[in-house]
Amino acid sequence: MKMNSIFSTALSAALLTPVIVIPMPAAAAGNESSKFTDTQSLPVQDQQKISVLVNRGIISGYADGTFRAQQPVTRGLFASFIARTFELQKPY
């Protein structure tokens, strides 16, 4: 494995882990994952994590109402997750 790939994977994990594991009170979390047509088959814990990220405005799914949990995350989509997580503004 190239060093760049290892570093990229480690950085991704380090940045996203705090976002995913931060608990929200059950009453505040709701079940936002149920708004997606393809998340009902996911484990409950995954649905809860999706709900947390939706409630925080980090993810929103696709326009056709799907979440596409099995689809790889593109570089651009990952960058938007980071920007939303840290409330980064566009430089222009």
Image (spheres, rainbow, N blue to C red):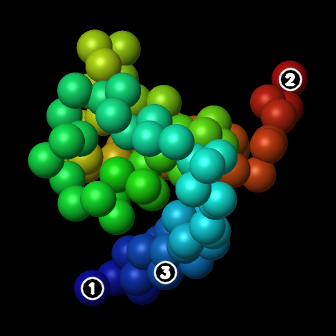
Query: Where residue 43 sits: x, y (%)?
Result: 22, 60
Compare residues 23 and 9 and report the one nearer the observer: 23
Amino acid beneath label 3: Ala
Distance from disc 2 to disc 3, alpha carbons, whole Å, reads: 30 Å
Q: Are marks 3 and 1 in contact (CB under 8 Å)?
A: no
- Say which mark, if any, is on residue 32: none
Residue on which disc 1 sits:
1
Label 1 Cα neighbours within 10 Å, binned few <14 / some 14-19 / many ≥20: few
Distance from disc 3 to disc 1, alpha carbons, whole Å, reads: 13 Å
Label 2 Cα neighbours within 10 Å, binned few <14 / some 14-19 / many ≥20: few
Q: Secondary structure at mark 1?
A: loop
- Say which mark, if any, is on residue 10: 3
- The residue positioned 61% from the left and 49% from the top of the image is 27
- The residue positioned 20% from the left and 53% from the top of the image is 42
Image quadrant where residue 56 sits: top right
Residue on which disc 2 sits:
92
- The residue positioned 76% from the left and 51% from the top of the image is 86
Query: Could one spot residue 66 in this view of the protein?
Result: yes
Compare residues 92 and 77 and report the one nearer the observer: 77
Horizontal relation, residue 3 to residue 19: left or right: left
Horizontal relation, residue 4 to residue 73: left or right: right
Q: Secondary structure at mark 3?
A: helix
Amino acid beneath label 1: Met
